[in-house]
Image (cartoon, rainbow, N blue to C red):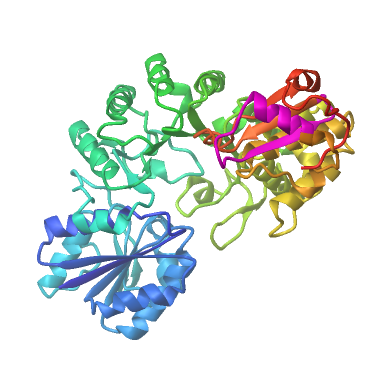
Amino acid sequence: MKLALGVFNSKYVHSSLAPWCLAAAVEQRAPETDCRVLEGTINQPPEKLADAMAALDPDAAGFSVYIWNRKATFAAVRRLRQLRPECLILLGGPEVSYCAVQMLKALPEADYILAGEGEESLPAFCRMLQEGKRPGRGELPGLCGRDEKGIYQSEPAVLTGPAPSPYTDACLQALGGRIAYIETSRGCPYRCAFCLSGRCGPVRLLDLEEAKNRILLLAASGARTIKFVDRTFNASPARAEALWAWMLAEYGRGIPAGVRLHFEIAGDILTPRQLELLSAFPDGAVQLEIGLQSFHEPTLAAIHRRTDCRKLAQNIRLLAKRGNLHLHIDLIAGLPLEDYDTFGRSFDTAFSLRPQMLQLGFLKLLPGADMREYPDEYPCRYRPEPPYEVIDTPWITAGQLDDLRGVEDAVERLYNSGRFLFTVEYLLTATGWRPFVLFEALAQSPAAPGMSLDDYTALVQTAAQNLPGVEPEKLRDALCLDRLAFESGGRLPRCLQRPDKALKGCRLRLEQKYPRPAGARRGTALLYGSGQLAWVDCWQPPHPVTGRRPVHRASLAQVESWAAAPGLPIEKGETE
C-alpha cells in the first residue's frame, strides 16, 4: 500500500513536523505501507503539490490542515481527486479536528478526517486498508467520515503511548537547513479560552535522554534555528532547568555555536535558577516567546489564564537585563472585558519591559476553542473564514480594532524592526507621552504598501517633527543614529543629508584617531542637536540579539582636538 502525506508551509524557511511524526509512526506500526512526505508552501500553486502526490499513485493521501493553509489544502484536495479518483483522501490537524462535520460538508472530495493526534490512528487506518477493509464509524479513535447514515464525528484522539522520533534520514534530508521544529513535551497545563493547546490531552513529557538525543541530531543537521513547539516549555520546572543546564553545557560543542534555540514559556513561573541559566547563554543563542495576552486582570480571569502579572513583569525585566536573550512578548486585542483604553494600558506595561519584539495580535475564534463554542459567555462577531479574526465585541468596536491595526503597523516598523529605537526613545522623552499614545499618533501617517526604508524614514521625520516638544534637529540626530546603527554601508538617506564642508575635516581627524582596516567602510554623521560627530564601523558585526552595530559619538570640541587635519574648521552643515 502507498500513502502520500502532504502539507503546505507558510514559507519555504519553515519546515513541518506533523507529517514526519505521522510517517515515522506508520513506518513503525504499519511497516508494509510505503509512506512518502511532500512539502510545499502557500506561495506556490496548490496544483504543484497535488500533482507531485498524484505522481506517486497513492492508495491514500493525507493532508495536515492549519489556519494558514486551509485554502491551499482544499484546492490541492480537489485537484488530487480529479487526478486520482480512487485514492482515499484524509485530513488532519487543528483546523479540522474540532469541526469535522462542517469541514466534510465544505469539502466533499475528502473521505475522512482523523481528528486529534494521529500517531496511532493513522497506522491503524493503513493496516485496515492493507487487509482490504475500509474503516467505518466507531472503528478508529478520532475517525470522522461518511456512511449511509450521513456524516459522523468522533472525539479527537489522544496518543496513549510514546511517539517515535520523526527525525528519519528522509526527514533530515528534507529539512535542508531550514527552521527545525522539535517537541519535548505535548499538551499544555493551561486551558485558555482562545487556544486549542489545552484540549490536546494532559502534558506528556518525552524521555529526558531521548529529548537530548533529538536536540543533538537536529543541531548537527545544519539547522540554524531549532524551535521547541512545547506549548509551555517550563511547565515542568525541574525538567526545564535540567534541559537548559545541559544545553548550556553543550553549546559550542554538540550544539554548534550560532544555533538559535527558541522556546515558548510562561514567564511568571520561572525560577531563580532558570533565570541564572538563561542569562549565561551566549548572546543571541536563546529566543524566548512569552505569552502575555493582557495585563488586565479581569480579562485574564475571563479567559482562564492563570498569570501572576507582577511576577511576570519582574522576570521579564530580569531576562532583559543582560541583553543576551531575544525576548518576544505578545498582546491580543479583542479579548473579553478589555476595551480600547485597558488595552492601551496593557500595551504601556508590556512596552515598559523593552522586549526585542512586542507583537500586537488580534483575537482569532478558532474552531474548538471555548470562545467559539460558548458564544453566550464570550459574545463577539468574527469573520467566518480563516483566520477567523474578531470583528468587534461588546467592549471594543470594529473602528477601534482598525485603529489598533494602524498601531500594530507602526510598532512593527518603528520598534520590532529594531531600525528606529533611538528615535522612539527620543520621541517618548520629548513628548512625555505614554508609549501607546505615541504609536497611536504615528499610526496617523501610515506607510504606503512597498514603501522603501529611505522613504519611510522621511515619512517619520515629517510626521514626528510636528509632535509637541519635538525639536527637529534632535529628531534628526536620533534618525541619523538609527540609520547608522542598522545600515551596513554606513549611508544616510537623502532626507537626513546636509551639505557641509566641515564633515570632511571631521572624517580626516577621525581617520587618524581611529584608523580603518584597508577597504573597510565607516558611516559618519554630524549631529547638530547635540553638537557631536557620530560614526559606525561597518566592519564590526551587528549584535546577534538587536541586529544593530554600535554607534560611537564624540563632541565636536573633542573631535577638533584630534590632530588629523589641523586648520580645517568645523562648521554647521554636512555632506554625507
In depth, the one of 184 and 279 nearer the eye is 279
**Horizontal placement of 326 versus 142: left or right?**
right
Residue 381 at x, y percent in the picture: 64, 54
Q: Is residue 453 above or below residue 281?
A: below
Is residue 103 shown to the viewer in this render?
A: yes
Quadrant containing the C terminus is top right
Quadrant containing the N terminus is bottom left
Q: Quadrant of residue 183?
A: top left
**Horizontal placement of 552 versus 95: left or right?**
right
**Horizontal placement of 477 versus 54: left or right?**
right
Residue 62 at x, y percent in the picture: 30, 67
**Residue sitting at x 34%, y 40%:** 187
Residue 225 at x, y percent in the picture: 39, 43
Residue 57 at x, y percent in the picture: 23, 79
Magenta span contains residue 518: yes
**Residue sitting at x 54%, y 51%:** 365
Q: How many marks are shown on the rendered structure?
A: 0
**Horizontal placement of 358 versus 530: left or right?**
left
Magenta residue span = 505-531
In depth, the one of 468 and 523 nearer the eye is 523
Q: Quadrant of residue 173?
A: bottom left
**Residue sitting at x 65%, y 24%:** 513
Q: Is residue 431 above or below residue 271?
A: below
